Amino acid sequence: MTSFTIPTIETDRLILRAPHQDDLPAMTAFFATERSHMVGGPKDEIGCWESLAKRLGHWALNGFGMWHLTEKSSEEFVGWAGMIFAPGWAEPELGWALMAEAEGKGFGFEAAQAARDYAARHQGLNGVMSYIAHANDRSRGLAERLGATYECDGTLLGKTAQIWRHPQIDLTTERTGQ
């Protein structure tokens, strides 16, 4: 049996941590909404439980994956961010999603930046890409804010998406602001 540890990252306002079963009710509520269609929804409770188990398995198999996000001040689960690389992906992807009540507060930027930096410095994933659905204006805006640039259209799991390329992280400098 392979053992693995999911690192914890703290930013000014967030804790990026391992997914756990207590997140299931919020995930189920999220995947019942229209906003989940951009990230593989809708899903029922069983589908959400399978997603939770797959996220843990992703860490075990790849040594990287999605962190779940806890807002420090409220201790609420507010979304997820991190790296995805599974069958159907052309290369590792930086992905993110936020609960509706967490949107518009800069949490997506803070979490994606921390996940991207950690992936470059500790997981050998530098200059990664993000798949973004054509209709997902908010994610495209976040990618631009992160310094990513549109590269081309591609296909992910049978659906057309935009591929955005993130800049390489300068690994000779220390990360500040986290």
Image (cartoon, grey):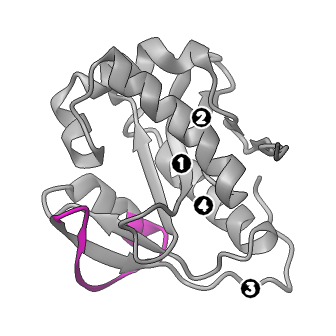
Name the N-terminal-most of marks 3 and 1: 1
Q: Which residue corresponds to mark 2?
A: 69
Three-letter code, disc 2: Leu
The mark total stands at: 4
Spatial CA distance of label 2 from label 3 is: 25 Å
Q: Please provide the residue range marked out in magenta.
A: 143-158
Q: Looking at the image, which residue is at 40% across and 77% down? A: 90
**Label 2 crowding class (10 Å Cα cut-off): few <14, some 14-19, many 20+?**
many
Name the N-terminal-most of marks 4 and 1: 1
Is residue 8 at all visible to an observer of this figure? yes
Name the N-terminal-most of marks 2 and 1: 2
* Picture quadrant where residue 164 is located: bottom left
Eye-nearest disc, 3 or 1: 1
The percent position of residue 168, horizontal first and vertical second, equals 62, 85
Q: Mark 2 and 1 residues: CB-CB less than 8 Å, in contact?
A: yes
Q: Which residue corresponds to mark 1?
A: 81
Q: Is residue 143 left or right of residue 175?
A: left
Spatial CA distance of label 4 from label 3 is: 13 Å
Three-letter code, disc 1: Ala
Report helix, strand or loop for mark 4.
Answer: helix
The percent position of residue 11, horizontal first and vertical second, equals 73, 45
Q: Which residue corresponds to mark 3?
A: 170
Spatial CA distance of label 4 from label 1 is: 9 Å
Q: Looking at the image, which residue is at 81% across and 68% down? A: 122
Along the line of sight, which residue is nearer the eye, 85 or 30? 85
Q: Mark 2 and 3 residues: CB-CB less than 8 Å, in contact?
A: no
Q: Which residue corresponds to mark 4?
A: 113
Q: Looking at the image, which residue is at 80% across and 83% down? A: 171
Q: Is residue 25 left or right of residue 66?
A: left
**Label 3 crowding class (10 Å Cα cut-off): few <14, some 14-19, many 20+?**
few
